[in-house]
Image: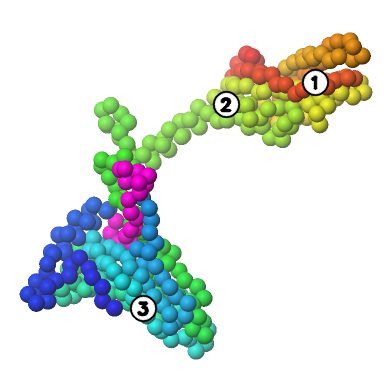
């Protein structure tokens, strides 16, 4: 079925209404992409400047294909080397089922400029037999070959012996791009791709964004920038959400938020016994074992008398990064869980604990 392209001519006067080569070069330069299906998205009121657009699948070559007697492709647009092809109506096809095994059908677009006075576009169906791979015979560069042809696969249909379409693959999976917006832009707030970054005053060392970011990352790795993680953290003892430790070279700094354990709502109540619990492991450890002690006090009324309880918890961080908490349980201890923020500065270069 023939469809329209931008190079359509006037058969009565035997001239082209549009000089397709010049228009194609302009469109190709603007889009930055040679061949692909044009993404027909539309203005959205969510963005006055068009940064947000509303996609409409009914303008993107919609396919209906249940069997070989019911294959229809709807309207859409595509470009090949800047020459746009479009279809405004549904186009239907029929095919035959394989006598055995599986058959593959390809629906494709064709740009045919072999007639110098009329550019021709077609939406066609190709029976590829039992092979799932089809290489279009015409892939001419229509800019450099003004009488060439170009074929662009839109769909591959898998058909069984009953004529049923059991699977479909669209142009993206067949290696054809969807052209959504210009590939490169010199003046734009948002662009899909930008190649170069200017980061020196004299511009003598400018390079690609990728090379610049790789260089920065390598320098940070050399300096030792990283975040210290805690594995196996016990939430009854450590507030991991508010704990933040960082490594800068041989210095570990940040904070650990230790908690007063309030297990099952009973605090540290129980028969007097010594408790030692492993509560987590740091990925970066101090050069020597350190201890942080915290005392919590609370009061309660027992038989009309106010009783004050005080308990001391000791958090120990070993040279392997293992954190343990030790304390002695108390009778009548029903304190609610509280937390204490402990700043950390470990200088492993000078082998000292600053804080």
Instruction: Name the image quarter holding the N terminus.
Output: bottom left
State how far apart marks 2 and 3 are (Cα).
Answer: 65 Å
What residue is disc 1 on? 335
**Vertical position of residue 230 compared to residue 23: above or below:** above
Q: Residue at x 16, y 76 (%)?
A: 115
Mark 3 surroundings within 10 Å by alpha-carbon count, few (fewer than 14), some (14 through 19), many (20 or more):
some
Q: Quadrant of residue 265?
A: top right
Q: Quadrant of residue 178?
A: bottom left
Which of these two is toward me, 173 or 93?
Answer: 93
Q: Position of residue 254 (x, y in %)?
A: 60, 22
Instruction: Name the image quarter holding the C terminus.
Output: top right
Q: Residue at x 25, y 42 (%)?
A: 186
Mark 2 surroundings within 10 Å by alpha-carbon count, few (fewer than 14), some (14 through 19), many (20 or more):
some
SS at mark 1?
loop
Mark 1 surroundings within 10 Å by alpha-carbon count, few (fewer than 14), some (14 through 19), many (20 or more):
many
State how far apart marks 1 and 3 are (Cα).
Answer: 77 Å
**Mark positioned earlier in the residue sequence (2 or 3):** 3
What residue is disc 2 on? 247
The mark closer to the camera, 2 or 3, is 3
What residue is disc 3 on? 92
Magenta part of the chain: 33-52
Q: Quadrant of residue 305?
A: top right
**Vertical position of residue 184 compared to residue 322: above or below:** below
Which of these two is toward me, 199 or 9?
Answer: 9
Q: Position of residue 43 (x, y in %)?
A: 32, 50
Q: Position of residue 346 (x, y in %)?
A: 62, 19
**Mark positioned earlier in the residue sequence (1 or 2):** 2
């Amino acid at each position: 079925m023939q469809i329209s392209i931008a190079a359509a001519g006037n058969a009565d006067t035997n001239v082209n209404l549009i000089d397709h080569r010049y228009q194609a070069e302009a469109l190709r330069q603007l889009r930055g992409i040679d061949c692909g299906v044009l993404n027909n998205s539309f203005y959205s009121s969510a963005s006055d400047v068009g940064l947000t657009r509303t996609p409409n699948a009914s303008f993107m070559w919609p396919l209906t294909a249940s069997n070989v007697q019911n294959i229809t492709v709807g309207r859409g647009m595509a470009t090949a080397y800047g020459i746009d092809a479009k279809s405004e109506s549904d186009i239907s096809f029929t095919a035959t089922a394989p006598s055995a095994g599986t058959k593959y059908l390809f629906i494709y677009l064709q740009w045919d400029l072999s007639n110098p006075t009329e550019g021709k576009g077609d939406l066609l169906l190709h029976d590829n037999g039992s092979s799932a791979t089809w290489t279009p015979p015409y892939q001419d560069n229509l800019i450099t070959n003004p009488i060439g042809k170009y074929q662009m696969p839109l769909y591959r249909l898998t058909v069984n012996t009953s004529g049923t379409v059991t699977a479909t693959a669209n142009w993206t999976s067949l290696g054809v791009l969807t052209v959504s917006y210009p590939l490169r832009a010199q003046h734009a707030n948002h662009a899909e791709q930008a190649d170069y970054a200017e980061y020196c005053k004299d511009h003598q060392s400018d390079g690609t964004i990728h090379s610049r970011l790789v260089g920065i990352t390598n320098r940070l790795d050399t300096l030792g920038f990283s975040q210290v993680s805690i594995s196996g953290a016990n939430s009854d003892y450590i507030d991991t959400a508010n704990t933040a430790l960082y490594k800068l070279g041989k210095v570990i700094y940040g904070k650990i938020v230790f908690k007063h354990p309030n297990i099952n709502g009973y605090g540290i109540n129980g028969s007097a016994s010594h408790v030692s619990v492993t509560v987590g492991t740091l990925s970066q450890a101090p050069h020597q074992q350190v201890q942080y002690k915290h005392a919590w006090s609370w009061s309660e009324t027992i038989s009309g008398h106010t009783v004050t309880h005080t308990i001391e918890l000791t958090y120990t961080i070993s040279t392997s990064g293992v954190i343990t908490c030790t304390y002695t349980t108390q009778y009548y201890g029903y304190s609610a869980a509280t937390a204490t923020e402990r700043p950390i500065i470990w200088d492993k270069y000078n082998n000292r604990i600053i804080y």
